[in-house]
Image (cartoon, rainbow, N blue to C red):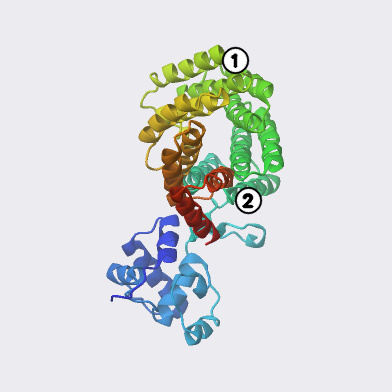
Amino acid sequence: MADARPNTVLRALMEAAELSHEDLAKAVNEAEEKRFEKPGNASGRQVRRWLSGETAMPQTHYLVSMMDVFGLTGDALGFALSGKRLAELAAFQPASTLLVKTPDQEDHVLRRSFMLAAAGNLLSFAFAPLPSSGRIGASDVERIRESITKLHEVDDLYGGDQLADIAEEFVRQIEKAMARCLYGPSVEKALYRVIGELHASAGWFAFDSGDQERASKNFDSGLRAGLLASDRQLQARIWSYMARQSWALGRATETITIARLALDATRNNRDHRLSALLHGRLALGYAASGQKAQTGNSLARAEAVLDRIGPDPVAPWLAFVGAGEVLSAGALAYMNLRQPGKAAQQEEQAMALRPSGFRRNQFATSVHLSQCYLADGQVELGISMAGKALDLYPTVNCPRWAVHLGTVRDKVAGMDLPEGDVFVERYDTVTAA
């Protein structure tokens, strides 16, 4: 059909639930049999028609079954439904078949659906189900870790806006489970560790969204959990976030102090990626305080330690650390030292080395490179790079760097250049959508 419109909402729901075409067809058939007491006949081919828009309004029994599969109302599935079809669906309440439900589910929001405001994509995030009574075991903790990994995958792709809510909600669910269940000493430490990791993540997501007070509260709570878990690596992770926040708030000395503390605390047992990250943070602090030689030394240490990274599995939160991240840290530092040309060179290399899966970081790099070019007097390049950042804007939710892109827009608007006027007009159109 020439006018078929793909169902991007359904596709996002399937991706979030990790369902293939055949998986969804099977789940729909099982839901239909459970709901209507007769076998379903959905197929992978039929699912592909729903996704492509060839079938814009599936039959009622399919829609009700999809409502049960995803635990959503019919109007949240992405189809163009008539008033009559919506009225038919109103008689059914979704009963999710994807989630393991607990007896006291009213106290446990196991799935959170949220809209990426800029991208217009609906994502559904499922918490790992926790015991309602009895004992919490190591397998429960492992499922929690899997959920944390998924949180960071979303952040890498789209940015952390709205993810702080999810991380904080998960902490509350874990704490409630700890209050009503039994567990041994080793599981207790593991639970405090994942609580600390979630607070660390929530703090970073809040920082990325521009909510500094909320970020600081989560960092403090995360450090407390790290102490209860006796986990120096977790504490160092949070200190790395706090150092970045301190630099962003203009606290150069505090940035240096926090980064040194993290390096000292993990001196004899530290992931090489963490070492590179912390030396990069130290470089930012030195640059903000005008210490050029110390800045160069710290960046050199960060680059040197990258060569020692082996094939061992990496913690999800550290997956972004590589040559591109260290080069971007150098670019930020050189801008502090009023060397925009050198900063631009660093950011150009960083952009070439950024893995494709880290869309949020690609957006940040594009915005900062635009700032570097403009500060160095390379106006055409600056406007062009700002345009590339604007291309990424609808696909990420990163308020902190979106503000910087707005600053670029205002600077370009005052230059009275034809290409600048084109960018400003497009910026205003894209950001208003």
Please count the marks in the image. 2
For the residues labelled 2 and 1, the Cα–Cα distance comes to: 38 Å
Label placed on residue 291: 1
Element at badge 1?
A: loop
- The answer to whether residue 395 shows anywhere in this view is no
Q: Nearer the viewer, residue 422 or 97?
A: 422
Mark whose residue sits in front, 2 or 1: 1
Residue at image mark 2: 165
Residue 382 screen position, x and y as percent: 45, 39
Q: Nearer the viewer, residue 189 or 136?
A: 189
Q: Nearer the viewer, residue 232 or 283?
A: 283
Q: Residue furthest bottom?
A: 84
Residue 49 screen position, x and y as percent: 31, 72
Kindly identify the amino acid type of the residue bearing the numbered disc 2.
Asp
Residue 130 screen position, x and y as percent: 58, 50
- Please indicate whether residue 85 sits to the left or right of residue 103 in the image: left
**Of callouts 2 and 1, which one flags the residue occurring earlier in the amino acid sequence?**
2
Q: Residue at x 46, y 22 (%)?
A: 272
Residues marked 2 and 1 touching at CB (< 8 Å): no
Task: Assess disc 1: are there few (<14), some (14-19) or many (≥20) residues with their C-alpha within 10 Å of its C-alpha.
Answer: some
Element at badge 2?
A: helix
Task: Assess disc 2: are there few (<14), some (14-19) or many (≥20) residues with their C-alpha within 10 Å of its C-alpha.
Answer: some
Q: Residue furthest front?
A: 416
Kindly identify the amino acid type of the residue bearing the numbered disc 1.
Gln
Q: Considering only vertical position in the picture, is 193 above or below 395?
A: above
Q: Residue at x 53, y 29 (%)?
A: 332
